[in-house]
Image: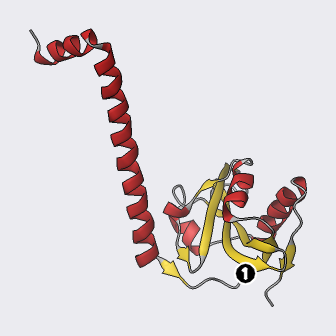
């Protein structure tokens, strides 16, 4: 008899043990991925952190978690594993999309939003910056050298905030 088949038959005979074994395997998988994710986050913080750029932003009366939830409703996903870290960054989300602007140019783009926790007179808030750029996995060179469209990113973010009835204060860098 095949030894693997014999093990499977013995496990199948004890249904409770099979359920426990499957649950244990899922716990191990989840723990392993959580450890890998944490390690990558820390490596990014140590080796790929830059000073924050002087881009325009909006300040909204949300926590980083609330801003993440709002952006997630519009198909944004965590994007930190593909980008530099900026000092004080609490939120890094992106939304990839396919579009043809010019034949032969980048076809995959991403809307990219970063958030930095701050305080206002009303309490906790987050300062959000934005841009639209070539998607890094599909167009790594174009992603690094540009172009990044800050005006389109601003229009998109303001539209999302307006759709949710979230008031914001524009902070323009001169």
Q: Which residue is mark 1?
A: 55
Q: Please say whether residue 75 is visible from this viewpoint.
A: yes
> Is residue 152 toward the left or the right of residue 37 in the image?
right
Q: Please say whether residue 56 is visible from this viewpoint.
A: no
Q: How many marks?
A: 1
Q: Nearer the viewer, residue 108 or 158?
A: 158
Q: Quadrant of residue 51?
A: bottom right
Q: Is residue 173 above or below residue 107?
A: below
Q: Nearer the viewer, residue 74 or 150?
A: 74
In the picture, the quarter occupied by the N terminus is top left
> Is residue 90 toward the left or the right of residue 26 in the image?
right
Mark 1 lies on a secondary structure that is: loop
Q: Quadrant of residue 5?
A: top left
> Is residue 149 toward the left or the right of residue 143 in the image?
right
Q: Residue at x 84, y 60 (%)?
A: 161
Rendering coords of residue 100 (x, y %): 71, 52
* Colour setup of the view: secondary structure
Q: Residue at x 15, y 13 (%)?
A: 6
Q: Nearer the viewer, residue 56 or 152?
A: 56
Q: Is residue 80 above or below residue 99?
A: below
Rendering coords of residue 73 (x, y %): 73, 47
Q: Residue at x 71, y 78 (%)?
A: 118
């Amino acid at each position: 008899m095949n030894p693997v088949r014999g093990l499977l038959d013995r496990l199948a005979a004890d249904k409770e043990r099979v359920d426990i074994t499957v649950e244990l395997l899922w716990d191990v998988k989840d723990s392993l991925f959580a450890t890998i994710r944490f390690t990558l986050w820390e490596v990014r913080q140590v080796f790929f952190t830059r000073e924050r750029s002087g881009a325009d932003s909006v300040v909204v009366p949300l926590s980083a978690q609330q801003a993440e939830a709002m952006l997630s409703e519009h198909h944004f996903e965590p994007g930190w594993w593909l980008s530099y870290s900026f000092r004080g960054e609490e939120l890094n989300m992106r939304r990839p999309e396919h579009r043809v602007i010019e034949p032969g140019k980048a076809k995959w783009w991403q809307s990219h939003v970063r958030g930095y926790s701050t305080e206002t007179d009303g309490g906790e808030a987050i300062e959000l910056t934005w841009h639209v750029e070539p998607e890094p996995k599909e167009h790594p060179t174009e992603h690094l050298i540009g172009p990044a469209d800050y005006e389109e990113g601003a229009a998109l973010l303001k539209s999302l905030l307006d759709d949710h009835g979230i008031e914001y204060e524009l902070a323009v860098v001169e």
